[in-house]
Amino acid sequence: MATKGRWRTALAYGDDDSVVIRGYSLGELVGKVSFAEAFLLLALGELPPPGHARTFEAMLVSVLDHGIVPSSIVTRYLASSGTPIQAAVAGGILSFGDTYGGACQQLAERLVHHRQLIAKGTQTEDAAAHAIVRHFFERGEKVPGYGHALHPEGDPRVPRLYAIADKNGVTGGYSRLAQAALGLDMGLDWQIVRALAFIPRSAGLAVHAVEEMKREDGWRHVPNDEIDYDGPPLRPLGRS
Amino acid sequence: MATKGRWRTALAYGDDDSVVIRGYSLGELVGKVSFAEAFLLLALGELPPPGHARTFEAMLVSVLDHGIVPSSIVTRYLASSGTPIQAAVAGGILSFGDTYGGACQQLAERLVHHRQLIAKGTQTEDAAAHAIVRHFFERGEKVPGYGHALHPEGDPRVPRLYAIADKNGVTGGYSRLAQAALGLDMGLDWQIVRALAFIPRSAGLAVHAVEEMKREDGWRHVPNDEIDYDGPPLRPLGRS
Amino acid sequence: MATKGRWRTALAYGDDDSVVIRGYSLGELVGKVSFAEAFLLLALGELPPPGHARTFEAMLVSVLDHGIVPSSIVTRYLASSGTPIQAAVAGGILSFGDTYGGACQQLAERLVHHRQLIAKGTQTEDAAAHAIVRHFFERGEKVPGYGHALHPEGDPRVPRLYAIADKNGVTGGYSRLAQAALGLDMGLDWQIVRALAFIPRSAGLAVHAVEEMKREDGWRHVPNDEIDYDGPPLRPLGRS
Amino acid sequence: MATKGRWRTALAYGDDDSVVIRGYSLGELVGKVSFAEAFLLLALGELPPPGHARTFEAMLVSVLDHGIVPSSIVTRYLASSGTPIQAAVAGGILSFGDTYGGACQQLAERLVHHRQLIAKGTQTEDAAAHAIVRHFFERGEKVPGYGHALHPEGDPRVPRLYAIADKNGVTGGYSRLAQAALGLDMGLDWQIVRALAFIPRSAGLAVHAVEEMKREDGWRHVPNDEIDYDGPPLRPLGRS
């Protein structure tokens, strides 16, 4: 068990008349730093270089919303059921799993592992790239983050992001290994990479929830003629 | 039931080579609009005036994180249990209910109701303010959004936000009625007001989840000597 | 704020070598009481009369699963996204809101209110029934729990449940007022009525999650030709 | 993507006047089968032998509730925040992750893998047991399901369950390999093993949610003097 009744954090604290984030008064941050800067400060402990903040802002915008996709479908089913908006959005966020929106996290973990080997001089970048591809192929999986089911010709947001990252000096050791790793080049932990998709998407999901509540009546459902039952045919129970 | 197998949305769509948000190509938005602008575009249908975007950005920063509070406590318990980060953050978001972080929504609903009466000329602003206070007092509740358990002297983020909103021309009919209503003065639906707290907080919760995973071992628990059991004392079942 | 670092409960406690529920050793309960009895013990504080346990068991079975419905649709979308089973089932449970599976709770609250008036002698059963119907009609709602979207001729599970409840001596003051109130006649709080649907359904949802994982490849999605976008047509951003 | 607008299931279906589970009319099942039997029917496709149902019933009772533990702590924080009961219970279920309540699933996966090798004759039971222990030790983990943080002397529910399982003819090839595998010996998938804990616990969590709502005022919080902040000390932002 982790704690004996005490909590500790290096992130932030609040008392009667202030909130302090990584040493800075929140009252002073409000209006003087962007949301992207504030997030990187919270996650990394220091305010980021301006180019990092600009690139991170672009990353947030790039995943804000994607229309009717699994995460928004879940949120809209929930909103139509009369559950409150915090539950409808939370349900949509749950969909950022290993297969759908969160797959980049498995890649990020591999990237961090191989960058350490490269840093120690025990592996070349080329060998690392091969090892990563092999790692996923051996498990019968595609390389996470490469190949988007909705964008067979390549995700249109990626080249735009890389142009911004290059111009802002973010592209580094990770990004040479693989796209999808800009967050790592900013110093973020691989464990948070998946959240870089669902944090901004939570905003999109909230708007979907409200659109569903305002435009659609009653609870959403699949019509019976779109459901195939292929279990056992009707049979008697034979108990009295 | 809401739909017969079809989905409709005015928010966004994606096809093989693009994503379009409210008519604008996402590829074009990335790097040219801030996250605050992009959100207001998605929610309202048009790009906001610059002053609205600046104020909204300040609102996002003002609720990014608050340290160890109920939402982050839930997220950290979940992160320590070995559930993935999307579930740990979703759990924290569930805490934005009627009592804790989401109380402003009930107020927003009342504000919209009374603004309509004021607009029709059937109620004065003064009478509306009285009616709203009475509405909550009759239910034995305090006015939501007024009086923060952690900040008995007043939430230190509020005057800072209002200074920014005033300077940027956001403060309007709603804000004269009550603080906490800047979102309504930007044209947002009252149904999304609660989300204005948990969207940015989702970012704070993700950082808490990672801090918990990296700094604490095993699952978090309350020590037995902090738990009082006051149910029936031990008794025999008396069944064989 | 509710507590000052201490927890209290009258439900159960565990120590190094035992778990005790409402005074009974869990080790003694296991194998000697049914799940229905154990739940009623936990919720009510005492073991229930045998007829109550039998009726409650029937209630659990009656809502175990309903095939492809909103709750299982949400669970299956989540399971197909690679999120773990606890998150897929939790997401499905979130759908038991005011409109879909949880509507009976609003009715239960009204029933408790009017039963108190009847008990005080200030309202007849007849007047109470009228008041309850009026309460929902005035809000433009149907009476919750009456009329199931999938069963326009009446929910086939209800008469069967009532036959069991009558035979087992459960049907009482609440059930005379309205169907759907058997739980109240057993002494349960109205606040838990909604959970009587999602507790057994959590079992159904877990089986749906596993069927989705085993029978379907990749993440579930709606085909593009079933989505209508009716927002603004494509337009230039006009920023450089 | 998994489907093209159609759904298929072998579990259950509903139409205007009935619900059918694995071929049996739900109306006929209600009152004639126990919840344990109904669940095993849904999960396995056929009604179970009586001894399996009795053992499964005992398993359900054995994890119904455990008092103030991480899952109920999460549920109680959520209930105290004014989020509805379906969200409070869903949040508690999210805690059944790889470290806390759901750890048995990783073991179940390994057991299934090695039972297949044993069945093929390529591994002895003894070698399989060694391989499983080694698998977890090499990852720096303890064997999941063995050793409970609250019960250093052994979980008191386990010998009781095994006595019931032995008497009812459930104990088989899996159980000889390791405790915690009774579900596998009943024919359940390893993917659902974790749910065997959180399905009955959802009932316990619902009772905790209601106890929290009824006994505690306002939202639950940790007192400030139990929180240590060890981030940077207060510092000026230095931006105008």
Image (tube, coloured by chain):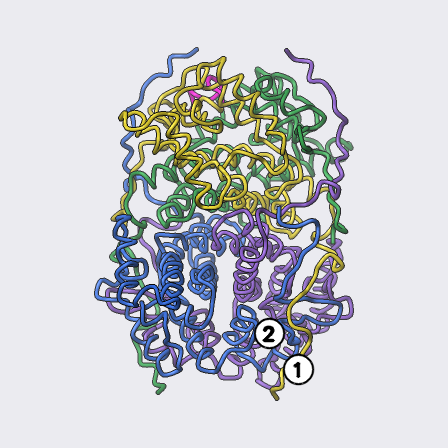
Chain colours: A green, B yellow, C blue, D purple
State the residue position of label 1. Answer: B236
Amino acid type indicated by mark 1: Pro
- Residue occupying image coordinates x 27% and y 36%: C228
Q: Quadrant of residue D28?
A: bottom left
Residue with the mark numbered 2:
D182
The percent coordinates of residue A41 (x first, y second) are 66, 26
- Residue located at (71% from left, 72% from top): C18
- Foreground pick, A238 / A101: A238
Q: Residue at x 45, y 49 (%)?
A: C218
Q: Chain of mark 2?
A: D
Please tell me whether mark 2 sits on a helix, a strand or a loop: helix
The residue at 35%/68% (across/down) is A231
> Can see residue A166?
yes
Left or right: residue A215 compared with residue A170? left
The boundaries of the magenta stretch are: B26-34
Give the number of the mark in front: 2 or 1: 1
Q: Position of residue A28 (x, y in %)?
A: 64, 20
Labels 2, 1: one chain: no
